[in-house]
Image (cartoon, rainbow, N blue to C red):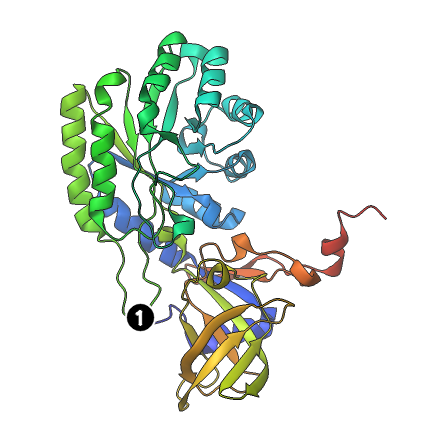
Amino acid sequence: MQALFSDAFFKDLAKQYGTPLYVYSGDKIAQQYNHLKDSFEARSTRFFYACKALTNQHILQLIRDLGCGIDCSSINEAYMAVRAGFSPDRILYTSNGIAFEEIEAAVSLGIHINIDSLSNLEKMGAKYGHNYPVGIRLRPNIMAGGNLKISTGHEQSKFGIPLEQIEEILQIVRRHQMHIRGLHIHTGSEIKDVKVFMEGANRLLELIDYFPELSCMDLGGGFKVAYRPDESGTDILQLAAETKLIQEAMSKRAGRHIEIWFEPGKYLVSECGYLITHVNVIKENGSTIFAGIDSGFNHLIRPMFYDAYHHIRNISHPNAPEKKYTITGNICETDQFASDRLLPEINEGDYLVFFNAGAYGYEMSSSYNARSKPAQVLHYRGETRLISRRETLDDLMHLQIL
C-alpha cells in the first residue's frame, strides 16, 4: 500500500513529537468527501460524518468547512459539534439505549434526532407531540458487516426498533400526533456489497405509506474501506447510481421529494490516519520473532477487539530482506498487532507505521497501565500542526481527589 507521506516525513515527525504518534492527512479527508459529493451530485443526498470515528475539534472543523454534516452518537458529541461550529440543521443525533434526559438536551440544541426505542418514542411523543419532528431508527433484520461486533441490523442486535413492531410504532405516532420526518437504518460497518444498502432501502420504501410527513430516508453508513493491499472498498459510483433509482421510487410513492441521507465515518477518516511507533525490543522465542513496540491496545485496539488487519511498514529499513515477525505492544496484556507478518528486517530502534489508523484508533484509546495517550498531528494544505499533545502524568491524575 502506498503511504500518503514519505518515510522521511514520518521520521521527522517522530523525532519532533515523539512516539507513538497519530498523523492525519486533511487533504485525504477532503478527497474522500469530495468523491462522495461528486458521485451523488444533484441527487439530493446529504452526508453526516459519523464523528465517533474521530472527534478531534480540528478534524471536525475541517469537515464542517468541507460542507459535510455531522452524525453524533452521544449528547457530548453533539455539544462537540456545536463547539466546532456546526449549525443545528447540520447535526444529526441518533440515540441508542439512553436516558430520555439526553434526548431532551438534544431537543434544546434544535438538532435532528433519531429515536431508537418504543420507550423513548412514547416519551418524545408525550412531551413534544407534533412540535418537534423526529426520525425513527428501525432494525431492518439484515445481517451485514465485516465482523459480528460491527453488525448492527441483524435480528439479535440491540440497535433500532424491530420492523415487526411497526404497529406499536404507529400507535404511538397516532396517539401523540407526532411528526415523523425520517426513517433510519444502519446495518453495520465494512459493507462492500451495494445490494445490502439497497435491501435496507427497499424495506424502508415499503413503509412510506404509513408516514405522510416523511422527507428523508437515512441509510446509515458502513462503507467498506480497503485495509489490505489486495482489497477494494465500496463502489461509491455504483452506490450513487443505485441510490438515485431507489430515491426516485421513494419520491414517486410518497408523492413528494424524499432526500437520502448517509452517515460515513470510517470512509472519511480511516485512510487519512497513521500511527508511528518505535521498536523497543526484538525477542526470539523458538520459531517466533517478536518485535515489541512502544504502543499497545491502549492506543490501537482494533486488531485485538475485531481481529482487524492493519498494514505495517518499516520506514527505517523498507528495502531490507523480509522475515516473519509477530508485532506486540508494551502493556501488561496480550496486545498482538500482527502474527507472522512478513516485513523487512526489523531492528531495535526502527520505526513502524500502521496504516488506516484514522478511524477508531485514537478515538478508542485509553490510558491503561497508566501509559499516556499519543499526540496527534494534522497535515493539511501544506501545513503541519499539533492538534493534541501527548498526555502527561498530571493529565492521568487530574480527576483524582488527593
Residue at the spot of label 1: 229
In front of the other: 108 or 59: 108
Residue 402 position in % (x across, y down): 86, 48
Vertical order, 152 against 338 (above or below): above
Q: Position of residue 213 (x, y in %)?
A: 28, 16
**Quick one: SS at disc 1?**
loop
Residue 371 at x, y percent in the picture:
67, 63
Q: Residue furthest bottom?
A: 321
Q: Amino acid at mark 1?
A: Pro
The answer to which of 282 and 357 lies nearer the viewer is 282
Tell me: 200 left or right of 105.
left
Say whether residue 213 is left or right of residue 4: left
Instruction: Please give left or right for residue 389 compared with residue 400 in the image.
Output: left
What is the tally of numbered marks visible in this picture?
1
Q: Position of residue 197 (x, y in %)?
A: 25, 42
Q: Classify mark 1: residues with Cα within 10 Å, few (<14), some (14-19) or many (20+).
A: few
* Residue 366 or residue 22, whichever sits in front: 366
Q: Quadrant of the N terminus?
A: bottom left
Q: Is residue 185 above or below residue 194?
A: above
Res 348 visible: no
Residue depicted at 54% across the width and 80% down the height = 291
Q: Residue at x 23, y 22 (%)?
A: 208
At x 46%, y 49%, the residue is 53
The answer to whether any part of residue 105 appears in the image is yes
Residue 195: name its quadrant: top left
Does 41 appear above or below 133?
below
Q: Residue at x 17, y 25 (%)?
A: 251
